[in-house]
Amino acid sequence: MVKKYMKAAILVKPGNMEVREVPIPEPSYGWVRIKVKACGICGSDMHYYKGNYPELEPDSIIEEKVLGKTYGHEAAGIVDKPGEGVTGLKIGDRVVVIPPFSCMKCEYCRVGLYEDCMDLKIIGYEYPGGFAEYMNVPDRNLFVIPDDISFEEAATLDALTVGVHAVHRGGVSISDRVAVLGAGAIGIALIAVAKKAGAREIFVTAKHPLQRRIVEKMGVSKIYDPGEKGLAKKIISDACSMGVDCVFESVGVKGEVLEFGVSILRKGG
Ligand SMILES: [Zn+2]
Ligand SMILES: [Zn+2]
């Protein structure tokens, strides 16, 4: 008998996600159904789950926008059924999901800035995501992963690409002193990529013990508690009394942390 239903986690109300039986989705033209093997929990997923929805307009109807959905955009899995018109992927391919689904028509898309698309949709937000046994994904939002990368590793790619993009934009190179504020998934990605880019010293603020342990293992110049007194002065003095060449803010709160970041930059940094 062909399986018709699957389990999917649905956000029923803030703080309450229920696993329900729902129909297995059919892929439409140009889309691919994948069997989900791993799916990361993003900071944004946690916001939706808890009921703080930072990017929603104040007057929007939260129920419509957020409840009743299946989240999870950091997904990896196996091609289960390519829809009509899909040529580059076949059943059994191991793939990772690229969440932003851009319109390919607006001014941003035309110059290749797909994430800035004026009509951007996210697979795992506007479209059902990977907290389910199966999900549908446009074929251009899937990349085949090498055999030696696990599904769990592939599911972290979303965070890692943020690190790659930011370090590239920051122009980090071999003589640079870098500060990474915050050591969550994005902070850790930033550290990993800044190291690869050859940063000579990396200074990190990490709030939680687990984050500190991970960062210690990665090998950075110094780890600070973000609540430390006189922290800006300390970092500046550790950075040759000049301040750092490049600061990355990965805490994700507006205001204070950004200002702090600017205050520890060297002249021209
Ligand atoms: Zn994410
Ligand atoms: Zn667009």
Image (cartoon, helix red, strand yellow):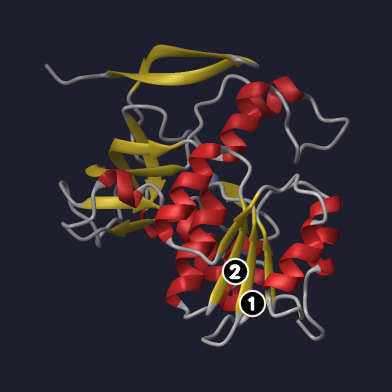
- Decide: is 125 above or below 262: above
Q: Please give the count of numbered marks on the rendered protein.
A: 2
Image position of 256 (left or right of 178): right
Look at 31% across and 40% down and name the residue there.
33
Q: Is any part of residue 110 visible from this angle? A: yes
List x then y, in percent, for residue 64: 70, 24
Between 62 and 224, the one nearer to me in the picture: 224
Look at 71% across and 48% down and name the residue there.
226
- Decide: is 195 above or below 119: below
Between 117 and 147, the one nearer to me in the picture: 147
Q: Quadrant of residue 241?
A: bottom right
Where disc 1 sits, the SS reads helix
Amino acid type for the residue under numbered disc 2: Ala
Look at 16% across and 21% down and name the residue there.
2
List x then y, in percent, for residue 147: 16, 57
Between 95 and 195, the one nearer to me in the picture: 195
Look at 77% across and 74% down and name the residue there.
265
Image position of 69 (left or right of 259): left
Q: Quadrant of the C terminus?
A: bottom right
Q: Quadrant of the N terminus?
A: top left
Q: Is any part of residue 82 visible from this angle? A: no
List x then y, in percent, for residue 183: 57, 50
Q: Callout 1: 10 Å neighbours few (<14), some, many (20+)? A: some
Q: Which residue is mark 2?
A: 166
Q: Which residue is mark 1?
A: 170
Q: Quadrant of residue 59?
A: top right
Label pair 2/1, CB-CB below 8 angstroms: yes
Where disc 2 sits, the SS reads helix
Image position of 61 (left or right of 222): right
Amino acid type for the residue under numbered disc 1: Gly
User: Residue 59 has which mark?
Assistant: none
List x then y, in percent, for residue 61: 79, 25
